[in-house]
Image: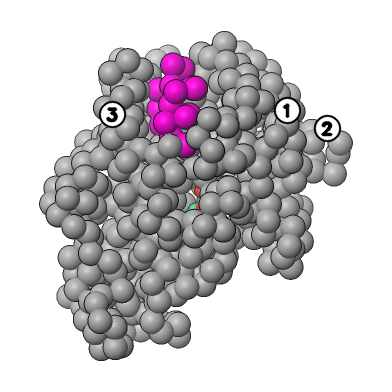
Amino acid sequence: AVSSNAQQERRFPDDFLFGAATASYQIEGAWNVDGKGESIWDRMTHTKPHLIKDMTNGDIAANSYYNYKRDVEMIRELGLDAYRFSISWPRILPNPLAPYEVNQAGVDFYNNYINEMLKYNITPMATIYHWDLPQKLQDLGGLLSPMFPEWFEHYARVVYEKFGDRVKLWTTFNEPREMCLLGYGGDEKAPFLNLTDIGTYYCAKNLLLAHARAYHAYNNDFKPTQNGECGIVINISWIGPLTDSEEDNYAAELKRQAEWGIYAEPIFSEQGGFPKEFAEVVAQKSIEQGYATSRLPELTEEERKFIQGSFDFLGINHYTGYLVSANEYKTANAVPSLLDDADVGVYISDDWLPSASDWLKMVPDSLYNLLTHLKDKYNNPPVYITESGWSEVPETGLIDDERILFYRTALNNALDCLEAGVNLKGYMAWSLMDNYEWIAGYTELFGLYEVDFKSEAKTRTPRKSAFVYKQIVKTRVIDPDYEPTDMVMTID
Ligand code: PNW
């Protein structure tokens, strides 16, 4: 019997947005079809396949360009409220500097996709940019070019104009850290520039300006008629101190500022600008290293004001966490670099369950710790968890009990957050289906649905976790004992 006492049963509110997420390059395939231009991931995987663990690429991936109706059918099977997908910039603007050359076939594809979602009352949440930059723009400097904010605003206006009558939830960028630290300041993501000294920081500044331009373009010119919302998605791990000591607390704060504060603080803090302590450390080290100015560029007063408050909500990709020590567990880093600027030790406990990805462990209460921290830090902004998930090796197959444990744990944390007054509005699982996991290729899989990449049809089959997630979405309650009776999926 349904309890009348709300305290006995912890449930998600009816308007809580449950969904699943994907990204264009990871699922679409059709890399050179119907006028699509070349992206930095096309170029990189084709010319340097050895950078990818299994030498694969996203040329075909889950072939969602052709399978999108099946994808929407899966979303219906799961009973999801929302679907987070990304738009491929080079599919829309194959020649990104020619303002009137919009690729109609690309527009048609996303129109069909979005209309298929709306037919079944599924709320689309669109990511404007999830890492597949047009190669042409990379040749001109990519995110390091001072022109980048203008290029991005132009592209954002095109997608608002084409899809904004139906898409009401927009995010500008997916994961600045992964782009700037790993792509420009490192060599783990395209364009693999490894400019450790200043690459990360110049990327961060241009990204913030580009985000703010796209936000203001929406706010001023589209929101009045389209009535949607625009935010940004930041990957935020929980970073806590290893001990209660003042030193470790300071080290953890410095690491938070370096890892995600440089992207979040300028937008979400009341005062704006780059995080104070970290900015001081970088300035100090830069001078010691012989630079004329800080390697972290200044934001002018005008830029600071332009970026501050440029959000309707905060999208967070949250997977994991770690603890920080001021003196122990340090490793060698490039000098100069962001990792050397925030020169602290990182501790990962052996007790935390490992996934198929070396960076992803199941860290107790990481989501709760993170969201309650952000609530206080940024005056409780509306938050969506835009990604959260667990990887397994391909051999795991359909019985993915560790993934089930991950989702139940994370969603219990989400309920704790709601009870603590966090303005949490939704949760998107990463991912709807197996897909191309960047430099890990197809060796680390995150799907609620397994994809048979060897089959011509890229057949999708629900895993056990799909049935468990479906049950939670339907009942709005986490039943720790629920077991699917069979593995037959239907649309309820
Ligand atoms: C995200 N971390 O990347 C991306 O948005 C997805 O495209 C990707 O497939 C997914 O998560 C799984 O990797 C992340 O270090 C990269 O905490 C790194 C971290 C988290 C997410």
Decide which of tag 2 and tag 3 comes sooner along the chain.
3
Query: Which residue is identified by label 1?
Result: 67
Q: In the image, which residues are magenta?
A: 155-170
Q: Is residue 169 magenta?
A: yes
Mark carried by residue 219 = 3
Q: Position of residue 361 (x, y in %)?
A: 51, 60
Quadrant in which the N terminus appears: top left
Measuring 49% from the left and 22% from the top, which residue is drawn there? 162
Report the residue marked by disc 2: 457
**Could you say which is closer to the camera, residue 187 or residue 329?**
187
Q: Amino acid at mark 1?
A: Asn
- The residue sitting at 21% across, 81% down in the picture is 284
Determine whether the residue tagged by mark 3 lies in a helix, strand or loop: helix
Disc 2 residue type?
Answer: Ala
Q: Quadrant of residue 228?
A: top left
Query: Is there a contact, CB below 8 Å, between mark 2 and mark 1?
Result: yes
How far apart in space, not on screen, are marks 2 and 1 (Cα)?
8 Å
Above or below 15: residue 451 = below
- Check residue 100 in the rendering and tell me which mark sits there, or answer none: none
Q: Quadrant of the C terminus?
A: top right
- Looking at the image, is mark 2 or mark 1 earlier in the sequence? 1
Query: Label 2's element?
Result: loop
- Horizontally, residue 167 falls left or right of residue 222, namely right
